[in-house]
Image (spheres, rainbow, N blue to C red):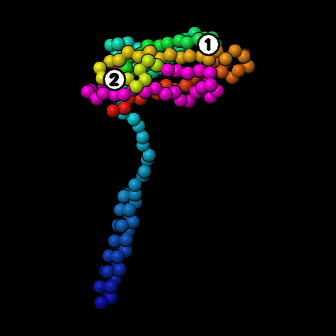
Amino acid sequence: MNKTKLVLVGLAITSMCFVSFAYAFLTALLIPSNGRVTTLQAYWDSACTNQVTSIDWGQTLAPGSTTTKDVWLKNWGGTSVLTLSLTTTNWNPTTATGYMSITWNREGATLDTPVLQCTLTLTVDADVTDATNPVIGPFANDIVITGTW
């Protein structure tokens, strides 16, 4: 009887050690992950070989001026028709949004062809006349072109 109890205690201890060992190997590590898959891309050319990664508006812009850049949008998603919209975010300096705007000629248009030419327009307000105005100088922002089904 004592031998049986000893064997059962030994089995219990062995089982607890195995469970603890197994638990150590079964503990999970949670790593948050995110990303985006997009089929909408912008290019500098109609053949879609030179992708737009940023826009340099070029020369120093005068108050009241506008400048344009042409880009071509391609929907790599095949036959999906996309309705297009444009917004801007992350202006630096933030006060630039009161004195500058970026618009385009395709707001609400549909991308139902393989490639669509678009004209982006940067407009500088005529009220940017004071050299102490915080908009004078370099600026940056993100242009977000969205295609919805």
Magenta residues (range): 74-103
Q: Quadrant of the C terminus?
A: top left
In the displayed structure, would residue 83 be above or below residue 22?
Answer: above
Q: Give residue 8's quadrant in the image.
A: bottom left
Q: Position of residue 28 (x, y in %)?
A: 40, 55
Q: Position of residue 100 (x, y in %)?
A: 59, 21
Question: What label does residue 86 carry, if any?
Answer: none
Identify which residue, 45 or 122, lies in the foreground. Answer: 122
Q: Residue at x 55, y 25 (%)?
A: 141
Q: Is residue 90 magenta?
A: yes
Q: Quadrant of the N terminus?
A: bottom left
Q: Position of residue 56 (x, y in %)?
A: 52, 15
Q: Position of residue 4 (x, y in %)?
A: 29, 85
- The amino acid beneath tag 1 is Gly
Q: Secondary structure at mark 1?
A: loop
Question: What label does residue 64 carry, if any?
Answer: 1
Provide the residue designation for mark 2. 111
- The amino acid beneath tag 2 is Leu
Q: Is residue 18 magenta?
A: no
Q: Is residue 50 visible?
A: no
